Amino acid sequence: MEKYIVIFTFVGAIAALLFAALTAAKVLKFPEGTDKMKKISASIKKGAKAYLKRQYTVVAVFFAVMFVILCVMAATGSLTWFVPFAFLTGGVFSALSGFIGMTIATSSNARTANACIEGLNKGLRVAFGAGSVMGFTVVGLGLLDISIWYTLLRYVFKLDAGAITSAMLTFGMGASSMALFARVGGGTFTKAADVGADLVGKVEAGIPEDDPRNPAVIADNVGDNVGDVAGMGADLYESYVGSIISACALGVAAFNGFNAMALPMIMAAIGILCSLIGTFFVRTKENASQKQLLGSLSRGTNFAAIAIAVISLPLVNICLAGKINDFSKVGYYFAILAGLLAGVLIGRATEYYTSDSYKPTRKLAGKSETGSATIIIGGLGLGMLSTALPIVIVAACILVAYFAPNGFKISSANINDGLYGIALAAVGMLSTLGITLATDAYGPVADNAGGIAEMAGLDEKVRTRTDALDSLGNTTAATGKGFAIGSAALTALALMASYINKVEEIAAKAGKEVETVFNLMNPKVLIGLFIGACLPFVFAALTMESVGKAAQSVVKEVRRQFKEIKGIMEGETDPDYATCVDLCTKASLREMVLPTIIAVVVPIVVGLILGYQSVVGLLAGATASGFLIAIFMSNSGGAWDNAKKYIEAGNFGGKGSDNHKAAVVGDTVGDPFKDTSGPAINILIKLLSMVSIVFAAIVVNFSLL
Amino acid sequence: MEKYIVIFTFVGAIAALLFAALTAAKVLKFPEGTDKMKKISASIKKGAKAYLKRQYTVVAVFFAVMFVILCVMAATGSLTWFVPFAFLTGGVFSALSGFIGMTIATSSNARTANACIEGLNKGLRVAFGAGSVMGFTVVGLGLLDISIWYTLLRYVFKLDAGAITSAMLTFGMGASSMALFARVGGGTFTKAADVGADLVGKVEAGIPEDDPRNPAVIADNVGDNVGDVAGMGADLYESYVGSIISACALGVAAFNGFNAMALPMIMAAIGILCSLIGTFFVRTKENASQKQLLGSLSRGTNFAAIAIAVISLPLVNICLAGKINDFSKVGYYFAILAGLLAGVLIGRATEYYTSDSYKPTRKLAGKSETGSATIIIGGLGLGMLSTALPIVIVAACILVAYFAPNGFKISSANINDGLYGIALAAVGMLSTLGITLATDAYGPVADNAGGIAEMAGLDEKVRTRTDALDSLGNTTAATGKGFAIGSAALTALALMASYINKVEEIAAKAGKEVETVFNLMNPKVLIGLFIGACLPFVFAALTMESVGKAAQSVVKEVRRQFKEIKGIMEGETDPDYATCVDLCTKASLREMVLPTIIAVVVPIVVGLILGYQSVVGLLAGATASGFLIAIFMSNSGGAWDNAKKYIEAGNFGGKGSDNHKAAVVGDTVGDPFKDTSGPAINILIKLLSMVSIVFAAIVVNFSLL
């Protein structure tokens, strides 16, 4: 089996990239519309590119410093020489994923708006096409990176399985660092611009959303691209790659051979093919209702999920042939199914709590009747309460994924077998990322298209169509978040296990004794747990604070322009869009550094002072509390957003009423919740593990206690 | 040594109760002022008593059901027959603490207002006297309960040390259940009334706080008493007793004798005496500044803390004589000091983040300039960020308390010795509760006095004086919260250890094998951890939701009265205060049941399905995330409250400005944060452990996995 790994993964990766390229070509054939639309789109693209360029410059400094540190460690024998380079490629590919996604998105927004002039179906095809480019670029690049390194390490340097996974885990760290920068930076940009534009434009000046008179309107649209597109691309690249390599690493730990490594890699490749076919199911008839639109997208993702579910059974059988008995093979198959199912269920739970088709968000909208304080309390409560279902789902998934491969022999379960099961569940969850990401990433494109339609003064019905696409995007984004959060928790657990394996390996080499049981009654473990649980809180605080600070500077600038530049409100003079873009860029770049540094430094410092036992506690604490806070913040934010939309749709007084104003406050609080802090925490919990793994040697050899 | 235990503890308990009685007599000698003041005070008292009576009726049903269940368990041999009765006494004494505190508080509010006519110093004496009655009643009853049971079990039933602590832990469960009811019920009442009174009275009708024309004004004042006084009394009774009995239990586990049990009990008794002397240091000169007032209170608490710190050294030496070497004895002394210091430091950190004398709250107030959304985001960020320092403090305290008794021999540390150290740290932290609670509990009395001054139309300067006292109360309350939260975390850890001991004991009796290592890589432990970490989120959500619901009903009622009862706004007709009180009572009683049932049922259900390994994970997860959420919510709430006050003091536009309105939204959101959800979570994390201990036999014998 093993010899086919590379063939399969290269085929999968190249198929994905080819498909992305073809789709991109198809999308770019659509016309961009009027000159005005072209001009607007061009300035959005320009702003987004300028931002990314400067972001990469800042990130490059970080990567350079880390590269030097890793080289020093390699020179002193704490790491192999592959590590510094693997770290770099992870970062570069992650950045590339974001960059390509952003390029296609900014090239498709005007095209989507223009296509919507002709009809909803055409608009959907352009926007979904752009989403597909992004989705398949992410998975294609992810699998390509894995394939290249695998080929290199296995056939050129002829390393054994353990050494290969060990090196591969380090490009995960590169990808995670880059993803965190992209999410925090992009998330701060987009929300600062959004909050700034809304607070002064909508609330103070009373002009509609996306009105060209608003000086922050271009920054707002740029933000959608650098945050929701480029940030998400880098983020999901990291999730995808992370789940596969952690499964490879645990496969090796469980079976010590290449076949167990093959399974997650080949599953990813086949998942790409299933997703690819799934995209052809996405189309809708003209004048489709919201439900039909959703049905059309669901057909695609459902096909992909069912296909991979079916194919996984023979796949497990072949990959693990001879290694284990049939009963355990079925067990691993169950683990994969559990992961797939858990992803879907968490997505459903997210939808239930955040969509205005269901009771919780509708009730939340009703709380606007007693003012902004009650809708805030209600939203916070809703978000906190919404953590319960996902926790139960993940708990059940862990239980099945861990014990099924052990034939449900609870008392005599083998730890490595069980952990491999958990890692496979994460791979199962993300195997169809190509298409789920496509349905997710098309949202911001539709959002931008709506903005362009508004600014270019297109017909009302165009905006209605882009709004229909956009609003659908919110629902698919909820499902996407379910997968992202669920897989983050499972991957983090798998990485925790990899860390422990790494510690054992290093200690064995150094002739040191290690305690491989991490007893909760050991104060070192407990303290680690406390500190780890605290990290997501601190991280959420810092990122929210960043958005607040950046937004305040935008607010001041917009107010200044309204006051100082004559004729803006009359539509006679164009506002100075570029300054707002520049302001957001500067603020978000300044703010993204500290959180990332904390994520890198804290596990090392805790390890150096308290030892590896505390690090494991830290990782467990951060995973548990991070999972909860990420869900809490995403769902609170989503519910506030949709509660506002529900009111805007004419309920509880409709647009402009006091209730609406209260709901806008909720939505504004929710912005950094759902688009900055929440998603960034998903990355954080994995980055912590990756950093711990890469720096394990230092901790094992030099820790104080 | 052992024979002196009972003498000492009875002396301590009776001294506290005697002092409380004498102080009460002294306070009650002060005149209540004008007829109007008497009338107002009487209606507050009436409302509060009516509430407590109905609360106890509801709680009685719960206790009856639990009593029957425990009796059945005793009859089937899963428990001893002491347990059901111990459970009852814990509940009764906890309720009694709340009741007595509430009685003296409602009898002192008018007296404080009246004393403030003559001067600040006199006002302080009355209010602080009332606080002292409460403080010493709580510690007196706590130690009395412990002493009685100890005498009974040791000398009448002649049980051994292990069986004694085992029975004593169960009255902890009674106390915790009662405390949770009192905190959640009282907290919901007070905040529903507060929010309702503010939203309609202050914001909509534009009348000042505590204006007699506001129909919810009496309910608001009743709320202060049933929530901040009765709720806090029951809560701290539980904390105090919990810390002592968990230390006793771990002392027995570490040394298997009575002397190690003696230490925490005698420390508590001596702590009472130190606190008692400390109260005599509290007095201030007329026209004292805020700083001098605080200095006067600090003198008292500082004296008590230093005295107990000094006396603890010989105490440890005597109690543990012969048991261990001198080096370890010094280690236990360090553990106690670490606890005392950690309590003070967490208090300081709380003050830093929530007092408007420091930068964070002032900056938060400044965020009101861009509206309510930014002050909400800012406050949430502040609260989350403020978890970092306390976590580091508690981590350091755990480290010292655990390893010092082991002579800092990290690798060969004895678990039981270390855990006893942690438990002693909690006892150290709470040993001077008598006086710290006095400085804390006087706040609501001063608050009520201000309300009465306002409603009775007393001179402006009286209100200024009560405000000075009240505002000081906010600072001392911050310190008090530090002790409550810090000790809750340490006590919860100690109880977790007791649970494990209990499981071992039961398994040994049943001839079952148990795994006494709780490995984080065991999926059962991990799942428990996830579920446990989720509980405080759910709990916070439910309690916030309760306040929201109850507040909405008050809002509607107040609006109705303004509309339907003619002449209220002109001051010609009295509003119908009683209906508002009744509404709050009904709503809060209805809402307090579900959270408590969840706290009792979840650990049992998780244990029955997943086994005791998951329960330990659950307790650890709940403690870590509960500690964090409690601090987050308390500090966010405190900071919003003080940011509003800072603006009211004339900064950022002062009262009535748009900034002030934004700050009021923050304060309203903060109300359930700091006075309902936050403090209730402290109790939750201990109740979970107590329930687990009491029902351990069922879990060990009947769990599914």
Image (cartoon, coloured by chain):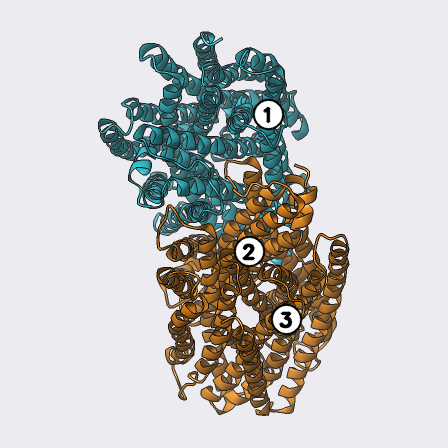
Chain colours: A orange, B cyan
Image quadrant in which you'd find residue A545:
bottom right
Query: What is the chain letter for disc 3?
Result: A
* Along the viewing direction, whichever of A130 and B653 lies nearer the viewer: A130
* Along the viewing direction, whichever of B322 and A232 lies nearer the viewer: B322
- State the image coordinates of residue A380 (x, y, percent, origin top left): 48, 53
Mark 2 sits on what residue? Answer: A495
Point out which mark residue B200 bears: none
Whether tag 3 and tag 2 are in contact, CB under 8 A, the answer is no
Q: CA distance from mark 2 to mark 1?
A: 33 Å
Q: CA distance from mark 3 to mark 2?
A: 26 Å
Q: Amino acid at mark 3?
A: Tyr
Q: CA distance from mark 3 to mark 1?
A: 53 Å
Mark 1 sits on what residue? Answer: B406
Mark 3 sits on what residue? Answer: A155
Q: Dot 1, crowdedness within 10 Å: few (<14), some or many (≥20)?
A: many
Relative to residue A32, is residue A226 depicted above or below?
above
In the rendered structure, the answer to whether residue B417 lies left or right of residue B57 reads right
Q: Are marks 3 and 1 on the same chain?
A: no
User: What quarter of the picture does the C terminus of chain A occupy?
Assistant: top right
Relative to residue B94, is residue A655 depicted above or below?
below
* Along the viewing direction, whichever of B638 and A152 lies nearer the viewer: A152
| Secondary structure type for disc 1 | helix
- State the image coordinates of residue B92 (x, y, percent, origin top left): 34, 25
Q: Dot 2, crowdedness within 10 Å: few (<14), some or many (≥20)?
A: many
Q: Nearer the viewer, mark 3 or mark 1?
A: 3
